Image (tube, rainbow, N blue to C red):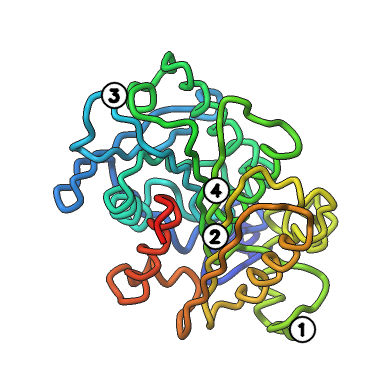
């Protein structure tokens, strides 16, 4: 093999390796599973194309015992993975969505989007917005997908994401609230789990020159090379002068004590409260846990507690 083919241009361990010849090697998040009926949760899933031009699909989830024409809250889910690994079809997200859909009794739309570095931002944002518009196209019950036509309650829509997916969920709520409102959809709330936010300014819980800050900044440069850096409102929403226009009435932010992004979640909540946005805001902080712990340890006590918090938020309990 030509030695130039094996030269590494960028590496973000343990996620991705990019070679000088353009090849991309994903080190995590490559496994996928097909849609199925899950007897443990009694949830059925299927994949449906929402963007033929980019060959992109969503995975839909519906409780099997849903009655004909029964309306359920809609949850649109954006997977994490630093904008460059994982898919909506990974076993990790498939299992999590099965459990959440069963616990909350909702219909879920898990969005697959184009990933960096082959498709740098704003590709993931554009795809996610296209997916939301596709969901909204079922408002009159004449859309292409029967599950949404028959069971989607467009008065109760939630956007949920973890890590980079939380970044996307925030971005979609900003677009809905300030830039291009989807008039037929009421985005009641967003759930931001361990959101991938960063920033030039050192905030509480961060130290200058830390490996974690360097990691977050280097990753951002790879997935969004056209941006101004970590002061870009896409990665630091506290710099967005329109933050008060967030297009939902409720926000749940989930952080964890050992997560290097914890401070950013708290800082986002602080700035959102002071932005003029008038909705309800809840921050949940799990002691002793790390980034997206609930995906890797779904049956641990705190993951179970987190699931209950998310379900309660969706169903307006407590």
Element class at badge 4 = strand
Name which of mark 3 and mark 4 comes first in the sequence. 3
Residues at circles 3 and 2 in contact by the CB criterion of under 8 Å: no
Circle 1 sits on which residue?
209
Residue 59 left/right relative to 274:
left
Where is mark 2, residue-wise? 252
Instruction: Estimate the spatial distance between the alpha carbons at disc 3 and disc 4, rounded to whole Å.
Output: 24 Å
Q: Earlier in the sequence, mark 2 or mark 4?
A: 4
Which is more toward the observer, 251 or 219? 251
Earlier sequence position, callout 3 versus callout 2: 3
The structure residue drawn at horizontal position 43% and vertical position 52%, both measured from the top left corner, is 316
Residue lying at 36% horizontally and 36% vertically, measured from the top left: 72
Quadrant in the rendering for residue 265: bottom right
N-term mark: 4 or 1: 4
Q: Quadrant of the C terminus?
A: bottom left
Q: Which residue is mark 3?
A: 69
Q: As drawn, which residue projects farthest toward the front?
A: 318
Q: Which is nearer the N-term, disc 3 or disc 1? A: 3
Q: Quadrant of residue 118?
A: top right
Report the Cα–Cα distance between label 3 and label 2: 29 Å
Q: Earlier in the sequence, mark 1 or mark 2?
A: 1
Seen as rendered, the residue at the extreme left is 39
Q: Nearer the viewer, residue 253 or 197?
A: 253
Closer mark to the observer between disc 1 and disc 2? 2
How far across and how far down the image is residue 287, in percent? 47, 83
- In the visual, does 280 lie left or right of 284? right
Residues at circles 2 and 4 in contact by the CB criterion of under 8 Å? yes
């Amino acid at each position: 093999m030509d030695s130039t083919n094996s030269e590494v241009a960028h590496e973000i361990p343990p996620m991705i390796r990019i070679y000088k010849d353009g090849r991309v090697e994903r080190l995590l998040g490559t496994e996928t599973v097909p849609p199925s009926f899950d007897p443990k949760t009694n949830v059925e899933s299927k994949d449906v194309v929402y963007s033929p031009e980019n060959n992109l699909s969503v995975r839909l989830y519906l409780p099997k015992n849903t009655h004909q024409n029964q309306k359920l809250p809609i949850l649109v889910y954006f997977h994490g993975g630093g904008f460059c690994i994982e898919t909506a079809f990974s076993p990790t997200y498939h299992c999590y969505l099965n459990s959440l859909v069963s616990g909350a009794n909702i219909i879920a739309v898990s969005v697959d989007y184009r990933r960096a570095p082959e498709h740098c931002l704003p590709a993931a944002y554009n795809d996610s917005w296209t997916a939301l518009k596709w969901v909204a196209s079922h408002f009159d019950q004449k859309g292409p997908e029967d599950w949404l036509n028959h069971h989607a309650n467009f008065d109760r829509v939630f956007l949920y994401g973890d890590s980079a997916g939380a970044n996307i969920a925030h971005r979609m709520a900003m677009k809905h609230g300030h830039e291009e409102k989807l008039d037929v959809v009421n985005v009641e709330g967003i759930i931001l789990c361990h959101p991938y936010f960063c920033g030039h300014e050192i905030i509480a819980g961060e130290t200058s020159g830390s490996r974690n800050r360097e990691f977050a900044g280097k990753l951002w440069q790879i997935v969004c090379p056209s941006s101004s850096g970590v002061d870009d409102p896409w990665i630091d929403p506290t710099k967005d002068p329109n933050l008060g226009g967030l297009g939902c009435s409720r926000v749940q932010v989930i952080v964890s004590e050992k997560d290097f992004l914890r401070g950013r979640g708290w800082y986002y909540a602080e700035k959102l409260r002071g932005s003029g946005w008038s909705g309800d805001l809840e921050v949940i902080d799990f002691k002793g846990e790390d980034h997206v712990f609930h995906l890797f340890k779904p049956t641990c006590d705190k993951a179970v507690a987190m699931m209950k918090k998310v379900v309660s938020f969706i169903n307006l309990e407590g």
